[in-house]
Amino acid sequence: VKLMESGGGSVQAGGSLRLSCTLSGFGFGEPLMAWYRRGPGNKCEMVSSILRDGTTEYADSGKGRFTASQVKPKNTLYLQMNGLKPEDTAVYYCAAARSYRGGSWCPVGNFGYWGQGTQVTVST
């Protein structure tokens, strides 16, 4: 199983970025997919999670600014981030799992499959 993120970069506060993630090698079954990030101090947190019924959950920090979407059956995941803030600076990871797990999938690599991450840096 391989996940590959792209779209990270450096932007000024208030700017936008769109992250993409491609999943390959998953085989049979429908993956649960999510975005996580690891910021300063190695703090890992969920950014968004898409459930099998299509419901998308967001961390409070991104509500109203971030929008996650998934294209099936290509299993491509996107994260549109608008109104970026310096505190959004982090490495963003795409993750996929075969079964539902309530709560956080942190730390990075702990549950399911993870990409290598893409750096997002927001300056003032």
Image (spheres, rainbow, N blue to C red):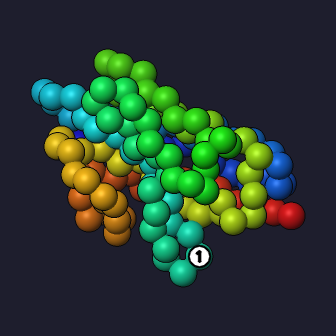
Q: Is 115 in front, or is 58? A: 58
Q: Position of residue 114 (x, y in %)?
A: 33, 53
- Residue 57 appears left or right of 64: left
Q: Position of residue 36 (x, y in %)?
A: 45, 55
Query: Image quadrant of residue 25?
Result: top left
| Residue name at image x 72 percent, y 41 percent | 82
To which residue does mark 1 refer? 40
Q: Is residue 3 visible?
A: no
Number of marks in picture: 1
| Residue name at image x 60 percent, y 46 percent | 63
Q: Position of residue 106 (x, y in %)?
A: 34, 65
35 relative to 86, above or below: above
27 relative to 71, above or below: below
Q: Is 1 in front, or is 91? A: 91
Question: Which residue in the rendered view is the most extreme toward the left?
Answer: 28
For the C terminus, the image quarter is: bottom right
Question: Which residue in the rendered view is the most extreme toward the bottom?
Answer: 41
Q: Position of residue 68 (x, y in %)?
A: 52, 35
Q: Is residue 63 visible?
A: yes
- Residue 115 appears left or right of 6: left
The local secondary structure at tag 1 comes to: helix
| Residue name at image x 15 percent, y 28 percent | 29
